[in-house]
Image (spheres, helix red, strand yellow):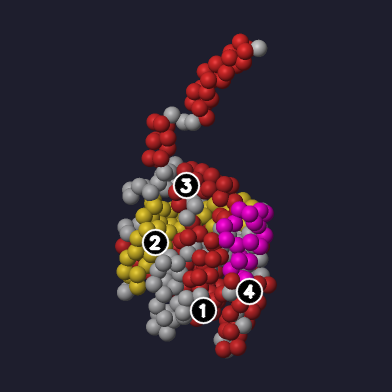
Amino acid sequence: MKKHLASAIALLVAAAPFAAEARCLPQTAITASVRAIPVIHYKSTSIDGVNVFYREAGPRDAPVILLLHGFPTSSHMFRNLIPLLADRYRVIAPDYPGYGQSDTPDHTRFQYTFAHLTDIVEKLTDKVGAHRYSMYVMDYGAPIGYRLALKHPERVESLIVQNGNAYTEGLAAFWDPIKAYWAEKTPQRREALAGLVTLETTKFQYTDGMGDIARISPDNWDVDQALLDRPGNKDIQLDLLGDYGSNVPLYPEFQAFFRERKPPTLIVWGKNDKIFPESGAHPYLRDLPDAEMHILDSGHFALEDKLDVMAPLIHDFLDRKVCK
């Protein structure tokens, strides 16, 4: 019995190094893996006297991917996507004035309009030397990106569209009180939109329609709401909600850009989004019949729920269309 026990112990001891070796990568592989992780730089630059924050990663001489965020968030929404693209691309993700880490000048002395935010983004791209780019547009980022495309159509290499509208079919019931404010900008109709900048609505945007809420970090709505609650920020958001109506008359021009320039386009759309529903995705194919469309079982902020699906689709699309 003792002889058998000793033999068993000896076998276990002999096997231990091999078990450890099988479970762990060699140190050289670990070092190589760490080196492969892209470094993200957090920067700001002054544009027309306003400090504009942006995240940047990837090789300086690589094709540029411009990530344009939505409401009520910031470049924070791209924090997980950036390192997955920056292995081969120069990724730039700004915060618009009034959002994230950018300055939030008072709305009485800074014009919070989509035309003005487009001018700021344009000047940022010029300042950082991004003279050609692919654009990931989402929510507010869509009209900002498309306005930028109208100003410089030759700069746009490709489009990645995620729950960003360019067709009236996409302005569903959620927009009815906002449309009422566009039609008559009274104090009463303005104040009726105040619920859109509350914690309840911010959390709703991140959780509604998501397949697995356990994948959605509460940091999202905590961070966004803390910024929304800064003094004066409510008026900034209400100004922009009021000005969103200025984008709708430009929809035919956006659509003409799609038809005439035919940028390679990837559409990745959360179908359960009540703000920009699936009905706004399919009309793109009228003007971009070669667009690649993926309708995902997700909500408004689909990157929080479907990053593992979206990142490979985006990287593969860029590899084929931009680095071909």
Kindly report which numbered mark, 3 or 1, lies closer to the viewer in this rendering.
1
Closest to the observer: 279 or 217?
Answer: 217
The image quarter containing residue 35 is top left
Which residue is disc 3 drawn over?
A: 84
User: Which residue position holds label 4?
Assistant: 175
Q: Earlier in the sequence, mark 2 or mark 1?
A: 2
Question: Which residue is rendered at x = 62% and y = 15% of the image?
Answer: 5
Query: Are the residues tagged 4 and 3 within 8 Å (C-beta)?
Result: no
Check disc 2 and report the residue beneath it.
Answer: 54
Nearer to me, 130 or 38: 38
Disc 2, SS: strand
Using the numbered discs, state the Cα–Cα distance from disc 2 to disc 1 in whole angstroms: 22 Å
Q: CA distance from mark 4 to mark 1?
A: 18 Å
Instruction: Examine the rendered structure and indicate whether residue 149 appears above or below residue 22.
Output: below
Three-letter code for the amino acid on which mark 4 is drawn: Trp
What is the crowding at mark 2: few (fewer than 14 residues within 10 Å), some, or many (at least 20)?
A: many
Q: Position of residue 252 (x, y in %)?
A: 55, 68
Gap between marks 4 and 3 measured at Cα: 34 Å
Residue 26 is situated, as x and y percent measured from the top left of the image, at: 43, 29
Residue 75 inside the magenta-drawn segment: no
- Name the element at disc 1: helix
Quarter of the figure with the C terminus: top left
Q: Label 3 is placed on what type of residue?
A: Leu
Mark number displayed over residue 234:
1
Count of marks placed on residues: 4
Labels 3 & 2 near each other (Cβ < 8 A): no
Highlighted magenta segment, given as a residue range = 200-218
Where disc 3 sits, the SS reads: helix
